[in-house]
Image (cartoon, rainbow, N blue to C red):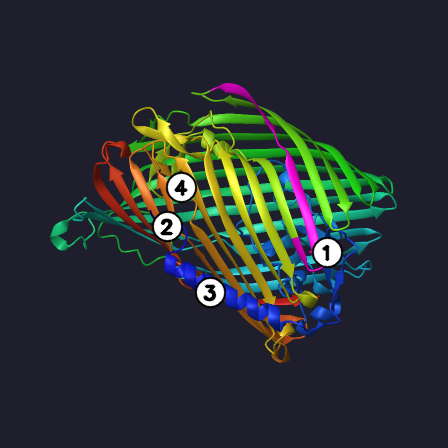
Amino acid sequence: MQNLFFPKEHQVLIFNNLIIFFCVLFFSIDISAQEVRQDNSNDAGSIIVYDPEYFKPYRPMSAEDMLRRIPGTEGLLNTYGFNQNDKRGLRSNTDQILINGKRLTGKQVSSSVFLANLPAKSVKRIELITGNVKELDTNVGSRVINVILNEDASTGSGVVEAGISASHKGPKQFATNISYSGDLKGISYATSFQLRPWSGSVDIKDVFTNPQMDELSREFETQRSKQVIHIARGSLSYDTAVGNVSINGLIDHLPVNKQYISDFFSDPTNDFTVSSESFLDNLNGENTKWELSGDITYRFNQKTKLVTLFVYSNSKNNRNNTNYNIPLDFDEFDSLLLTLDGLEQLGGDNRDKTETEKILRATLDFNFNERNQFEIGVEGAINTLDKSIEFYNLIDNVQVNIPIINSDQKITEDRIELFTSHSWKPFKKIEIETELAGEFSSLDQVGSDVSSSRTLKYFKPRFNIFYDPNESSQVYFSLIRSVGQLDFDDFIATVNREDDEILAGNPELVPEKDWNFELGTEYRLKDGSGVLNGRAFYRIVNDVEDLTPLGIDDSQPGNLGTGYDYGMELEASIRFGKFTKLDALLSGSALIRKSSVKDPFTDIKRRFGNQPKYEFRIEGSHDIKSFGLRYGFDFAKIGPKIESDFNEFDDKSFSSGLRLYLRKKIIDRLDLSLYWANALEQTTSRERKIFSPSQLSGQVSEIQFREFKRLYFYGFRLRSTF
């Protein structure tokens, strides 16, 4: 049987290294430090406090710089992660960063971005919390960062950045960021504006063969873009004797300017080295989104409070793509983006999409005593999508539209969720949390070809147990019923530009649901010198989302039935400066998993589509304080994936990703950063077997080998505080 984890020899090597690594750590660490302290006032859990003295030798410029030097915070700061959830509503927001004990409200507002723009001198202390945090509906076993700001920020402070970013075979572009925060007559404020290059260079190579591996044709595609994203953020907060009011805002604008150039090679007489025809896709448009969010907290007394949250977001996307034939003698391929003068237009497509989300949530919290806490609440939401696509050919300079079924829809979902939870501490070291939630929604879809209405309702219980055998460790168990977020794009026909395919939509799609059983443990090394943890999980997944049959010769997004997903994850984050002379931080995580579901095209069990067999990440950094120098790396590797379609089956593999960086303090309040991202030019390799007439026949008619390479990019940044 095929091994769905690491190869056997890799398993033995990884296991042996982990055993040696952990043994060295447990027997070596016995150093104390004054700048890190333990707070065990929270019975079921603990708080590690990092005071300003801890960070003073590093002279950090922002709150993010401070957090980068704390073991166990990497996964909370980075945008990637193994446990990112796409669940419904604010209640499932897994942002695990608090500012003064409160989460920033919003679906697009990221606390980690806020911290990058917050000057270090505004921070009073940082707390790393393990245990159940009432301000958040986090995953069980999740660590939470709480950044406590100085009370007196009336003078205000800011961060300004400027630099150049360049993409290999792409443009060199200017980047800048300016932020300012402070306090004005009791109103705390923060604002930032950023210009960031949003460009990338991709090279794609396709080789088509017959089942006997004789080459039939080749295709080369280059994707080039020159884009800059404009981002403005702001927040206001006002504290009173009985509560707090906060408002957050975001505006994000990206003008789209891309070109895809495809060269086809179909003549075997010259070994497929001379192009037979070339085409250009020229994309223009814009993405604009804005969001307004906030919260109001009112304390009736020391034991009762009302928390109200709201979000209103709007996102508009439009694309205008024109297709051109490129003459074989065309001589402008050296330019980044080609001019269109003299090219013959063949056709094109237009896409317009507007999404909105409105959420209002209210929670009433009762803190009866130290052992019992109770909450009851309601969350309402209205989500909409208005989308249309059109395709056309140009014949004798006349536009001729191509009919597409289900190419436009306006979708509205009205959802309400009622929830209640109870936290009970029967003993000092044990906390038990139970929760009941019910979700009810109605979906209305109106389009030229499809119009329908339906209702959805789900029951979502949760049961968590936290156990702290001592002040340095925790064991937890959870049983959670969760419901995935519906992607309204899957309801409507769309375009897969990578494969030049029009994908059918499915207006009857339902959310993916799962019962998630999880058992985990965490061990905190002495004096904040590191964190070790592991977890095992088992998921029973209902209505697995994947491609399903459409008619007798096509496919569409759909629900497969019940599947199973299980595995384990290990994490370690160590600060070596606590027990060696090397002031370095090393963090890593490894996730391995198996899954099983019945393929709708072959009736054979297989793993979930587009789910990697394993994921591995490691980050390291080294500070040389005497030189004001810090350098490091981020390394990532994910395992192979599969994808199954009506007449195609894909095997995908991925090379490693690597980012290198160096930061040097030039003078006080000024530093220089150099970076080289995607240094190994991460490549996705795909072997696609094409069956005739379908997978069920088992007859392979053609094999496609694809190499999708993302090219590296690099740059520098000067940063100063004021």
For numbered disc 2, what is the local secondary structure? loop
Q: Residue furthest bottom?
A: 626
Looking at the rendered structure, the secondary structure element under dot 1 is strand
On residue 3, the disc is 2
At x 35%, y 57%, the residue is: 335
Circle nearer the viewer, 1 or 2:
2
Q: Which residue is mark 3?
A: 16
Residue 95 in view here:
no
User: What is the C-alpha distance between the residues marked 2 and 3?
Assistant: 19 Å
Q: Main secondary structure of the magenta part?
A: strand
Give the amino acid type for the residue marked by disc 1 in the picture.
Ser
| Circle 4: element type | loop
Q: Which residues are drawn in magenta?
A: 451-474
Compare residues 15 and 100 and report the one nearer the observer: 15
Which residue in the protein does label 1 denote? 46
For discs 4 and 3, the disc positioned in front in the rendered view: 3
User: Which mark is first along the chain, 4 or 1?
Assistant: 1
For this rendering, which residue is in front, 238 or 483? Answer: 483
Give the vertical position of 492 relative to 171 (above or below): above
Left or right: 212, with 354 as reference point = left
Of discs 3 and 1, which sits in the foreground?
A: 3
